[in-house]
Every structure is written in C-alpha cells, then in structure tokens.
Image (cartoon, helix red, strand yellow):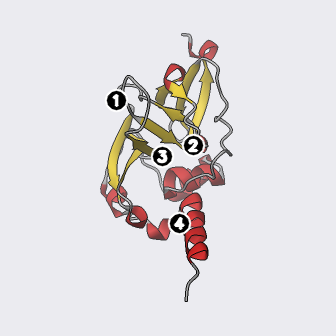
C-alpha cells in the first residue's frame, strides 16, 4: 500500500523537476516558431538548467531563481532568443518562490493548455522561440488580476541603462 505522504512527496518532486515524460510535449513539437533549432544547437547555447526549463518544460525549485530578488528597472527577456518579455514595473513578489509579473510586454508570449499531472493550467511560452517560461494564473494583483509565474532560469535581465539606444 502506498503511503499518502510518500505519494504527495513524489508528485511534488516530479513537479519541481519537471518530469518531461509526464508532460504532453507533442502539441509544442507541432507548432512552428520564428526561431527553431535542433536539440543539439539549443544544448550548445543554453546552460543545462535553461535547457531543462525552456526546451523540456521543466521547473526550477521555488526560491532558487537568481532573478527572484531582482528589483532594478529594466527588462526581462527570453534566455533562449533574447526577446523582451516583461517590464520590471510589472514584477511583484507573489510569495510563491518564482519571479511573478502581472502582464507581459505586447506580442511577447504565447499560451497553451497544460494538463500535466491531471491539473489544468495555462502554460506560457516565448512567442518567438517557443521556450517554456512558466504558467499564468488568475490570482494576481490589479490591474490585470493575473500572475505570470515564470521560471527565472528561462529569463535574463537587462538593466534599464543597457536598454538605451
């Protein structure tokens, strides 16, 4: 007989590490994006953690993101293709352990249904390269009421001084 605590612990670990064999990746594979690379090309460009999150739809453990406490003015971009995704003035502390935003930049992200582990959520990905970024929930602050809960390793941060032309 399976102990309930052991079962819940196993599920929590699987979710934290993004067990790709439990995720329906076929839908992403059928989509076409502006930037497409082979797995080998992505692996050469990304760190192992970035690859796991962006290309295998993994998840970093909560409170481990290097961008969680980033509070400077600037832009958060896709770690895969450098597309600007979120402005720093939409970032807030959701208390969840992942960088959270109440709104993406225009034409920055795409969404799709995610039914991993029997939960129905909305997955968020970079609209240019298809890299997995996290999920969006409807429990965020005004003005949108949305919480874009992003994996920090899927993002890079560009301070405002670097954004000037």
Residue at image location 34% in from the left, 29% down from the top: 107
Residue 44 appears at what percent x and percent y? Answer: 62, 51
Q: Residue 95 appears in which quarter of the rendering?
A: top right
Residue at image location 39% in from the left, 32% down from the top: 108
Residue occupied by mark 3: 134
Image quadrant holding the N terminus, namely: bottom right
- Please tell me whether mark 1 or mark 2 is closer to you in this view: 2
Earlier in the chain: of badge 3 and badge 2, it is: 2
**Which numbered dot is residue 107?**
1
- Rendered position, 165 above or below 98: above
Residue 112 appears at what percent x and percent y? Answer: 32, 49
Residue occupied by mark 2: 96
For marks 2 and 4, give the CA distance: 20 Å
The one nearer the camera, 6 or 53, is 6
Residue occupied by mark 4: 19
Asked if the residues shown at circle 2 and circle 4 are in contact, with their CB atoms under 8 angstroms apart, the answer is: no
- Please tell me whether mark 1 or mark 4 is closer to you in this view: 4
The one nearer the camera, 136 or 161, is 136
Residue at image location 36% in from the left, 27% down from the top: 144
Earlier in the chain: of badge 1 and badge 2, it is: 2
Q: Secondary structure at mark 4?
A: loop
Earlier in the chain: of badge 1 and badge 4, it is: 4
**Which numbered dot is residue 97?**
none
For marks 3 and 2, give the CA distance: 13 Å
Q: Secondary structure at mark 3?
A: strand
The one nearer the camera, 23 or 91, is 91
- Please tell me whether mark 3 or mark 1 is closer to you in this view: 3
Q: Secondary structure at mark 2?
A: loop
Q: Secondary structure at mark 1?
A: loop
Asked if the residues shown at circle 1 and circle 2 are in contact, with their CB atoms under 8 angstroms apart, the answer is: no
For marks 3 and 1, give the CA distance: 17 Å
């Amino acid at each position: 007989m399976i102990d309930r605590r052991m079962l819940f612990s196993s599920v929590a670990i699987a979710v934290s590490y993004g067990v790709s064999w439990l995720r329906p990746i076929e839908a992403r594979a059928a989509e076409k994006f502006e930037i497409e690379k082979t797995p080998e090309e992505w692996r050469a460009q990304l760190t192992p953690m970035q690859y796991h999150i962006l290309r295998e739809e993994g998840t970093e453990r909560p409170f481990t993101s290097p961008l969680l406490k980033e509070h400077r003015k600037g832009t958060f971009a896709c770690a895969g293709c450098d597309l600007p995704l979120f402005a720093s003035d939409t970032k807030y502390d959701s208390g969840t352990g992942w960088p959270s935003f109440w709104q993406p930049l225009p034409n920055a992200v795409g969404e799709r249904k995610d039914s991993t582990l029997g939960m129905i959520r909305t997955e968020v990905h970079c609209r240019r390269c298809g890299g997995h970024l996290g999920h969006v929930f409807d429990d965020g602050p005004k003005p949108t009421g949305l919480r874009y809960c992003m994996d920090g390793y899927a993002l890079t941060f560009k301070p405002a001084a670097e954004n000037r032309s």
